Image (cartoon, helix red, strand yellow):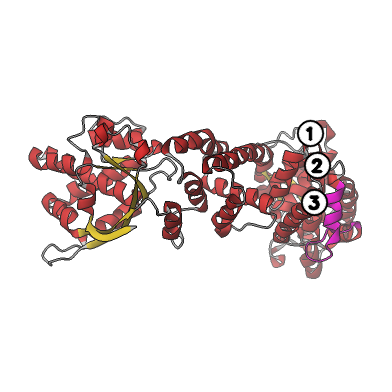
């Protein structure tokens, strides 16, 4: 590695250098706040003060393999991969393009041409794409190329972050009537960097990891993508990125957070212990190193093939919107992800038993919600199951999993029928888990409502109704305080017997109304659970407990 302090302008303005953002690097991400900071840093440079500079951090790069330089014109063009610093280089180039364009408007074509030919394009290279000094990855290339070449941009181009940041620079310079020549002076002589060139024996991946280990700029999913593709040839990078990684991103809705979550679950499944969000990259390194094949290409290809297959399973199980006909799909509404690694493994290796295993998982989670046991404890439980399963393809896999669940007698336990039944009457269900409450009530309704399994009212449009209102006890009308003293109110208002489902509009209109007024609305409701309340003439502690007993009997049939 060769590292030295240098002027940014000297690095960018080298006559025969082209910097290339590798395909595996994330797209351009700097936002308006970053541009504002960039401008503020430039404004703080006082040209009157000798040698006052701004340090723009490191630019780390390595030479493109000599075997891959065939496209360079007569090998005159030196091509370099940017390992770290693409956001800073891209932003600086946008800044220079804005300066060039304003100079052209001022009819100072001599200075505009100098800025363009020295820092934006290489005037001595005939091939247009080869002449652009900074070559971005595919997601950013079109808009950036048009800006560099002064081509016309369409409406979609102008929505791109690349254009918006260029435009912020342009408007800043125009609006503030800053001396454009002072801006040029600051760029050419007052911006310092650490110019870091990696030699052939250096490991760019390790250096990249160390540079980003303490920062927040890159997510672990970005680091993983860089890790698996960085040491491949350019042609191999393009092939594996487009065939596999890009497709994985598409399947996961091009959502960076979702991709990272998927990778956590995938690694938990394979490493058989819980992978935390902040430990995903380090865990992937360990996983990768245990999968080495004869060549780096074959290792990466094998892992990406597996990731692609599991991303499809992940999408099918956890992202596709389905109704409540099966536990493997309805479970998603609980918003508990601790079981994902286990179900992924079952669906891949023993798909005929996926639904049975999902039923066991649902029983386990619902019972814990009713009893009031924390869902967070289940992460380690499900990882333990993955580790302890002796034969994932066993015809009795569902029973094996149930047995493992019932071994734990502590916080991770599988509640018994007795504990489950007793808790239905006393558990502060609504306080413990509103999402779980809604799920349980909906599943009961789905079980009862055999004639309308499609449930025409969307799940998302439903809300939980407290029959005895949950308001401050002192504000309750006399019709309620006659039937419930304060102790009864505190003990039972959030229990299952006092809860039902209703549409959001109706819920807000019922408020603290007395039961007879509420009951007129309940009688006309489409939900059997809510409609059945019309059989009560009043709502008392006895009627609440009778309803809890009725619900308990149904729940023991559903979650047996």
Q: Nearer the viewer, mark 1 or mark 3?
A: 3
Q: Is mark 1 on a helix, strand or loop?
A: loop
Residue at which label 3 appears: 389
Depth check: 16 or 167 in front?
Answer: 16
Q: Compared with residue 453, is residue 284 higher up or lower down, i.e. above or below? A: below
Mark 1 vs 2: CB contact within 8 A:
no
Residue at which label 1 appears: 453
Q: Position of residue 160 (x, y in %)?
A: 36, 39
| Residue found at x 23% / y 62% | 54
- The residue stretch that appears in magenta: 399-417
User: Which residue sits furthest bottom?
Assistant: 487
Earlier in the chain: of badge 1 and badge 3, it is 3
Mark 2 vs 3: CB contact within 8 A:
no
Residue at which label 2 appears: 393
The quarter holding residue 306 reads: top right
Depth check: 277 or 334 in front?
Answer: 277
* In-image side of 246 versus 7 (left or right): right
* In-image side of 264 versus 528 (left or right): left
For the N terminus, the quadrant is bottom left
Q: Position of residue 394 (x, y in %)?
A: 84, 43
Q: Compared with residue 121, is residue 490 higher up or lower down, i.e. above or below? A: below
């Amino acid at each position: 590695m060769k590292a030295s302090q240098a002027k940014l302008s000297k690095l960018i303005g080298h006559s025969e250098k082209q910097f290339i953002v590798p395909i595996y690097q994330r797209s351009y991400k700097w936002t308006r706040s970053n541009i504002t900071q960039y401008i503020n840093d430039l404004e703080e440079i006082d040209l009157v003060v000798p040698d006052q500079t701004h340090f723009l951090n490191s630019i780390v790069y390595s030479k493109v393999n000599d075997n891959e330089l065939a496209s360079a014109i007569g090998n005159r063009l030196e091509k370099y991969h940017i390992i770290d610093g693409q956001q800073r280089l891209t932003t600086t180039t946008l800044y220079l393009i804005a300066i060039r364009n304003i100079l052209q408007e001022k009819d100072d074509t001599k200075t505009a041409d100098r800025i363009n030919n020295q820092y934006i394009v290489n005037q001595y290279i005939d091939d247009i794409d080869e002449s652009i000094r900074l070559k971005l990855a595919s997601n950013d290339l079109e808009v950036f190329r048009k800006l560099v070449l002064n081509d016309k941009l369409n409406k979609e181009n102008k929505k791109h972050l690349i254009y918006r940041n260029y435009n912020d620079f342009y408007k800043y310079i125009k609006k503030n009537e800053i001396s454009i020549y002072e801006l040029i002076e600051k760029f050419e002589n007052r911006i310092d960097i650490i110019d870091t060139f990696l030699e052939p024996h250096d490991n760019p991946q390790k250096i990249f990891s160390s540079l980003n280990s303490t920062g927040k700029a890159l997510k672990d999913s970005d680091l993983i993508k860089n890790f698996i593709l960085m040491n491949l040839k350019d042609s191999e990078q393009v092939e594996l990125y487009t065939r596999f990684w890009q497709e994985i991103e598409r399947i996961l809705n091009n959502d960076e957070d979702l991709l990272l979550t998927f990778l956590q679950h995938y690694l938990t499944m394979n490493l058989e212990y819980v992978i935390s969000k902040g430990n995903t990259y380090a865990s992937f390194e360990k996983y990768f190193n245990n999968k080495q094949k004869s060549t780096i290409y074959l290792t990466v290809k094998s892992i990406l093939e597996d990731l692609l297959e599991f991303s499809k399973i992940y999408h099918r199980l956890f992202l596709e919107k389905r109704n409540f006909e099966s536990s493997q799909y309805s479970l998603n509404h609980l918003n508990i992800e601790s079981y994902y690694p286990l179900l992924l493994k079952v669906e891949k290796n023993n798909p005929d038993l996926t639904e049975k295993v999902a039923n066991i998982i649902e029983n386990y989670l619902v019972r814990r919600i009713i009893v009031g046991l924390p869902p967070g404890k289940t992460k380690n439980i499900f990882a333990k199951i993955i580790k302890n399963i002796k034969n994932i393809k066993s015809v009795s896999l569902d029973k094996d999993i149930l047995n493992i669940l019932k071994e734990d007698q502590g916080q991770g336990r599988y509640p018994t029928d007795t504990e489950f039944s007793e808790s239905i009457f006393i558990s502060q269900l609504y306080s413990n888990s509103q999402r779980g409450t809604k799920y349980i009530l909906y599943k009961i309704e789905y079980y009862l409502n055999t004639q309308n399994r499609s449930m025409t009212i969307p799940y998302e449009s439903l809300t939980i109704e407290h029959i005895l209102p949950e308001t401050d006890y002192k504000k309750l009308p006399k019709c309620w305080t006659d039937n419930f003293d304060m102790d009864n109110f505190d003990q039972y208002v959030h229990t299952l017997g006092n809860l039902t489902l209703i549409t959001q509009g109706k819920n807000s209109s019922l408020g603290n109304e007395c039961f007879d007024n509420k009951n007129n609305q309940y009688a006309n409701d489409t939900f059997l659970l809510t409609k059945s309340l019309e059989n009560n003439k009043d709502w008392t502690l006895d009627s609440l407990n009778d309803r809890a007993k009725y619900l308990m009997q149904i729940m023991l049939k559903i979650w047996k």
